[in-house]
Image (tube, coloured by chain):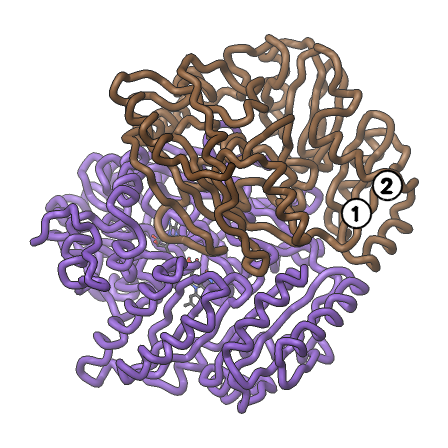
């Protein structure tokens, strides 16, 4: 099943270039609901798949973009390692889609994000050149760090065909605690704990209780868990949170993802809230207008993305200041002068 | 190939009317220090790569962001190139001035603007020293993780420009992993915010692109960094080996065993002896190599990890193991490593520090090859590594007063870097390309990739006025490099015209 189909992908881009037809790149299509709709010919990456190299003692894994994320994670699990940023699957995610969307799960504030672990990638650009950027080594500052720029670019700069990522050992021990306190008290405690060396790797207030995940050696997890209190519950909570499968995420009410500074101040907005990332990421169910939500969030130094609902259909991603948008356009122009790759997915102007 | 700016290969630079420019700058920036006499310019003629020197047209030392904006706007209009300089500790000639350019020193931007212990962030000006951030955060039990050996001197702006690392970056990451937001001024004088105070920001990740861009895309005028809680304890194990290869293999074994040490460093016999002579760290001077493995975190975990690492090291053939008994001894173990460069400086009139990265599995092969090259060139090489992340710092010992030795050292250095590329590594792990490795970039990247890099540069600085000639070689330079340097019979960049 594993196959190097980069030649085929490159031919597709060449053809798109020749007849000037935009491409809508997709892997597992698991994140189709994110961003603006793209008017283009579908280009599926899933035939270009397979783990190219994986050496546990190097802490590096390289796989083709169309490889199912689940397959990558299974290979890592077998050797006691993981993708530390805990990217969501949302169904049948591919490795390439994971990087293109750049979304990270509950461990993100402590472990780092998907982009933090990207070491290198291969890219087919707007001139149908197949480029090799970054590499398979942990430290590399030769040239510009294009691989990290591509992370979270939603395929607007080109077609990512292969990625090398740093991976880490799975922690020896893990425990989930449920502490019944309200959100304000949870945020207060989290603020106190932030400057202490505690093995916290997940902190979410689900509306009823503070859910904490501890990861590390037995000693530190045991000691912290008896100090922090609460009841020991199933670790499955974190997967449900990562996959947006908790009851909070059910139903049709608009869903917003809000990123905030670590100051743990919450915007005053109508609707239901779930706090993740120890207060640095909020999920909001609210019928409020996009402008009202964004104003409140911007004031605190954050930004807001609309993940579900038609409230902000044309600008699901937080709008950019004019000078920054102009720079985005100049970058897009350099990577993809004909506008072939996912035009408009991030912003109408890109 | 000389690495000083060469208009024939690196592109023509516009002529500048110096007296007119100085008059205009004085009018534009009243009260700002503008240095222009040879005597005043001398201290700025080089950075840490002191074999190469050029006097700039003038040095400007602004004190406010508005002044930086005004300066850049003006230079943009007049088409005068600008080179940024932080503390000037860079080792790749990134801050090497241009004869026809302004050197913009950020040395006056020394204020720590804000420390927020609850949010664990610090907002600082670009000229603030790396260590000063950790010192200011210490009363809150916090610190800034990336710790380059130059941390007492280097500036955070320079760290951002080079994506600096340190002995702890295997576990805690490089600069790119530890900054949240960078405010920059682009060549046309526009101030932009990249990243945000949150953990991510809307749009493309321009912060990640900017970190490590060596002053070619914009001037850093403010940086917000993450602070981390100080680990409860840190312990250091020192393992001796009678064979460098066994030490190299042990590194992979530790990582494969599921342990990520805070630091994992290696030194070979020559560096051990030099460091011991200088610092009296208690190193075993007869060992072929030592590994220093620091384990940090919560006390009980660290104790358990120490036990596991001890087993792995013994199984890997360590001949002796010692655990630093107390904080004093731990500091001494590290002092030897952190002073390895100056220590080697004591046993040789000059040394040339390399900075390649390799996959760890290639370590034994690369060490063997370096040994062979060292024989071939008749120059000693001391090896010091950030072993955990495959970042090697071979130090080539030479005497610049012996005619031809500097050139031989540079040739040998170039060969070592090409060796790194050959085994799938990189020509620079943390010191940057600057001017020093501009030719080896042609070995690491093909012309398609180089063209993309130039395209990115154009998006930020269409006229190519910020730090021209650094980081990314022109295709003309690569053609020339290829002509002089037919590698394994295959010509790199065969598509380019030779001249
Ligand atoms: C003894 C010694 C040990 C070292 N150890 C390490 C180490 O362990 N790890 C490591 O990573 N490095 C190390 N270095 C290299 C050096 O200290 C780093 O590269 C450091 O980040 C440079 O900072 P600086 O302020 O001195 O920058 P400079 O040398 O002044 O400049 C470096 C580059 O950054 C650009 N620049 C500087 N400031 C700005 C700004 N505000 N905006 C835009 N561009 C700017 C310059 O144009 C130049 O290209 C070492 C150097 C020495 C001398």
Q: Residue at x 79, y 48 (%)?
A: A174
Shown in brown, the chain is A
Q: Which corner quadrant of the image does residue B419 belong to?
A: bottom left
Quarter of the image where the C terminus of chain B is located: bottom left
Residue B140: percent from the left, percent from the top? 71, 54
> Could you tell me residue B359's position as x and y percent?
47, 61
Q: Give neighbour class at mark 1: few <14, some 14-19, many 20+ (Cα, 10 Å).
A: many
Seen from the viewer's position, the closer of residues A145 and B242 is: B242
**B51 over A228 or under it: above or below:** below
Residues at marks 1 and 2 touching, judged by CB atoms closer than 8 Å:
yes
Query: Which quadrant of the figure has residue B309?
Result: bottom right
Residue projecting furthest to the front: A1
The dot on residue A214 is: 1
In terms of sequence position, does the residue under pointer 1 or pointer 2 come before the other?
Answer: 2
Residue appearing at x 57%, y 34% in the figure: A68
Task: List the single residue furthest toward the bottom.
Answer: B286
Dot 1 lies on which element? Answer: strand
Q: Colour of chain B?
A: purple
Relative side of B372 to B227, left or right: left
Residue annotated with mark 2? A177
């Amino acid at each position: 099943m594993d196959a190097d189909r980069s030649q085929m992908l490159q031919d597709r881009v060449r053809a798109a270039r020749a007849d000037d037809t935009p491409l809508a790149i997709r892997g597992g299509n698991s994140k189709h609901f994110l961003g603006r709709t793209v008017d283009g010919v579908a280009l599926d990456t899933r035939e270009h798949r397979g783990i190219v190299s994986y050496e546990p003692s190097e802490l590096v894994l390289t796989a083709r973009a169309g490889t199912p994320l689940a397959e990558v994670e299974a290979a890592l699990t077998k050797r006691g390692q993981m993708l530390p940023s805990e990217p969501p699957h949302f169904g049948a995610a591919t490795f390439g889609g994971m990087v293109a969307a750049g979304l990270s799960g509950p461990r993100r504030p402590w472990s780092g994000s998907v982009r933090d672990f990207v070491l290198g990638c291969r890219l087919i650009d707007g001139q149908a050149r197949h480029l090799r950027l970054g590499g398979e080594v942990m430290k590399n500052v030769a040239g510009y760090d294009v691989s990290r720029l591509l992370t979270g670019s939603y395929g607007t700069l080109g077609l990512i065909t292969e990625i090398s990522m740093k991976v880490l050992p799975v922690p020896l021990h893990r425990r989930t605690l449920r502490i019944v306190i309200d959100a304000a008290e949870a945020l207060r405690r989290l603020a106190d704990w932030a400057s202490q060396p505690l093995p916290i790797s997940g902190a979410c207030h689900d509306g009823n209780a503070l859910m904490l995940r501890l990861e590390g050696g037995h000693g530190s997890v045991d000691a912290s868990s008896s100090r922090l209190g609460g009841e020991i519950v199933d670790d499955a909570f974190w997967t449900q949170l990562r996959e947006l499968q908790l009851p909070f995420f059910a139903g049709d009410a608009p869903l917003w993802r809000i990123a905030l500074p670590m100051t743990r101040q919450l915007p005053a907005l109508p609707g239901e809230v779930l706090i993740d990332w120890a207060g640095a990421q909020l999920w909001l169910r609210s019928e409020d207008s996009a402008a009202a939500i964004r104003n409140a969030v911007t004031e605190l130094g954050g930004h807001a993305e609309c993940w579900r609902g038609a409230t902000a259909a044309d600008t699901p991603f937080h709008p950019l200041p004019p000078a920054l948008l102009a720079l985005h356009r100049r970058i897009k122009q350099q990577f993809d002068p004909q506008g072939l790759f996912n035009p408009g997915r991030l912003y109408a102007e890109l | 190939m000389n690495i000083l700016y060469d208009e024939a290969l690196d592109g023509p630079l516009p002529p500048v009317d110096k007296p007119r420019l100085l008059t205009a700058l004085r009018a534009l920036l009243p009260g700002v220090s503008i240095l222009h006499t040879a005597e005043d310019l001398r201290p700025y003629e080089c950075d840490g790569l002191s074999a190469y020197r050029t006097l700039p047209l003038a040095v400007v030392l602004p004190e406010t962001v508005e002044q930086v904006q005004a300066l850049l706007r003006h230079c943009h209009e007049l088409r005068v190139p600008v080179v940024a300089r932080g503390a000037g500790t860079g080792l790749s000639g990134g801050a090497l001035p241009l004869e026809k350019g302004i050197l913009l020193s950020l040395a006056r931007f020394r204020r720590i603007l804000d420390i927020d212990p609850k949010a664990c962030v610090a907002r600082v000006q670009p000229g603030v020293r790396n260590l000063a951030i950790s010192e200011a955060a210490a009363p809150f039990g916090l610190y800034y993780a990336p710790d380059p050996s130059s941390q007492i001197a280097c500036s955070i702006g320079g760290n951002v420009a080079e994506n600096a690392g340190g002995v702890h970056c295997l576990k805690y990451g490089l600069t790119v992993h530890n900054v949240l937001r960078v405010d920059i001024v682009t060549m046309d004088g526009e101030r932009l915010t990249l990243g945000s105070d949150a953990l991510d920001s809307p749009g493309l990740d321009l912060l990640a692109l900017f970190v490590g861009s060596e002053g070619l895309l914009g001037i850093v005028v403010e940086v917000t960094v993450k602070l981390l809680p100080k680990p409860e304890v840190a312990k250091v194990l020192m393992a001796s080996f009678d064979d460098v290869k066994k030490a190299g293999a042990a590194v992979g074994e530790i990582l494969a065993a599921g342990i990520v040490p805070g630091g994992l460093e290696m030194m070979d016999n020559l560096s051990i002896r030099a460091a011991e002579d200088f610092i009296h760290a208690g190193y075993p001077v007869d060992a072929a190599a030592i590994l220093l493995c620091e384990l940090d975190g919560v006390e009980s975990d660290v104790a358990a990890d120490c036990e596991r690492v001890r087993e792995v090291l013994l199984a890997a053939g360590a001949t002796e193991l010692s655990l630093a008994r107390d904080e004093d001894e731990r500091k001494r173990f590290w002092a030897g490593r952190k002073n390895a460069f100056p220590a080697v400086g004591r046993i040789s009139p000059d040394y040339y520090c390399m900075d390649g990265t390799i996959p760890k599995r290639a370590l034994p092969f690369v060490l063997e090859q370096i040994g062979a090259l060292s024989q071939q060139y008749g120059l000693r090489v001391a090896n010091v590594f950030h072993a955990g992340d495959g970042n090697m710092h071979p130090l080539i010992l030479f005497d610049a007063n012996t005619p031809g030795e500097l050139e031989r050292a540079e040739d040998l250095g170039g060969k070592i870097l090409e060796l790194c590329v050959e085994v799938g590594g990189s020509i620079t792990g943390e010191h940057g390309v600057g001017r020093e490795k501009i030719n080896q970039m042609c070995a690491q990247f093909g012309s398609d990739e180089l063209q993309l890099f130039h395209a990115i540069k154009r998006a930020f600085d269409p006229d190519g006025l910020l730090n021209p000639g650094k980081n990314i070689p022109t295709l003309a330079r690569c053609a020339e490099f290829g002509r002089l340097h037919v590698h394994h019979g295959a010509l790199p960049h065969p598509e380019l015209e030779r001249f």
